[in-house]
Image (cartoon, rainbow, N blue to C red):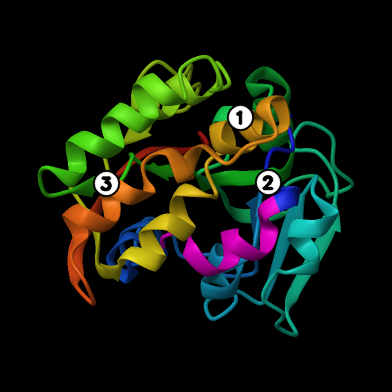
Amino acid sequence: MKDNFSKVSSLYSRFRPVYPREMYDFILSLFSGRDAAWDCGTGNGQVASVLSDHFGRVFASDISENQIAHAIRKENIVYSLQPAEHTSYGQNQFDLIIAAQAAHWFDLPGFYREVDRTLRQGSILALVGYSHVDVHEPIGSLIRTFKDDILKGFWDRERQFVDERYSTFPFPFPEIGLPEMTICYTWTLEQLVGYLHTWSAVQHYRDHKNADPVSRILPDLENMWGEHEIREVSFPLFARIGRKGR
């Protein structure tokens, strides 16, 4: 598992999208147990925080100490530094295991073994994520050029799984489809730029070239965006959801 986000953990907690209530409602409707959940690859703890309102205890793990340092604190959330593939959790401990915008970084065979060990019979595994930001034209075209041309060669190969909406993942559980859902916001230009700075490829570009790639498109972004404007942005959701056989 790669740690691409420790350097931008404060930005991550401020500018990454938040999953909609309807996604949680759908996943929670699939089972009745509410004892314990595992948020694997928790990042800033946004998913763990929501789950904490529905479970007795939420166990949230990540390999980034800096991410966890910036994570949301609640009394029934137990944070830990450990990889997805090898944990200290108990046998058949969880009613729900969820990985949000994280599973593409895992060693999936190792993670699935850990899921099979720690997930209770009849309970749910949910691998959820969102696609790249969608903005109206011509801003959308500029961002696609930034992603595909300026950042070409700086994306980890695992990011391809996100572009494919996890459709090429091996998934060893009977599947349950997620209804079509989209995260929608009205954002300022500052919020969009903050979000772009959280991209893993932006970090790789900066490390390699000692320069900020976002600055290459910022003048055009400012011209297209307009002064003091807020604009609609969206992130289509996708998921692989399955139930452990009884």
- Distance, label 1 to label 3, CA atoms, is 20 Å
**How many discs mark residues in the rendered view?**
3
Q: Check disc 2 and report its element: helix, strand or loop.
A: loop
Q: Is residue 209 above or below residue 100?
A: above
Say if 77 sits above or below 172 in the image: below
> Is residue 35 found left or right of 162 in the rendered image?
right
- Name the residue located 75 percent from the left edge and 53 percent from the top edge: 61
Residue 130 position in % (x across, y down):
36, 44
Q: Nearer the viewer, residue 92 or 201?
A: 201
| Distance CA(mark 3)–CA(mark 2) | 27 Å
Q: Nearer the viewer, mark 2 or mark 1?
A: 1
Q: What amino acid does circle 2 point to?
A: Phe
Give the residue at mark 3.
Answer: 220
How many other residues sit within 10 Å of disc 3, few (<14), some (14-19) or many (≥20)? few
Do callouts 2 and 1 mark residues in contact (Cβ within 8 Å)? no
The residue where tag 1 is placed is 205
Q: In the picture, residue 166 is in which quadrant?
A: top left
Mark linked to residue 113: none
11 inside magenta stretch: yes
Q: Which amino acid type is marked by label 3?
A: Asp
Residue segment shown in magenta: 8-17
Say whether residue 52 is left or right of residue 81: left
Q: Of discs 1 and 3, which sits in the foreground?
A: 3
Q: Kindly report the secondary structure that dominates the magenta region of the rendered protein.
A: helix
Q: Residue 38, percent across and down?
A: 66, 55
Which residue appears at 84% of the width and 34% of the height? Answer: 86
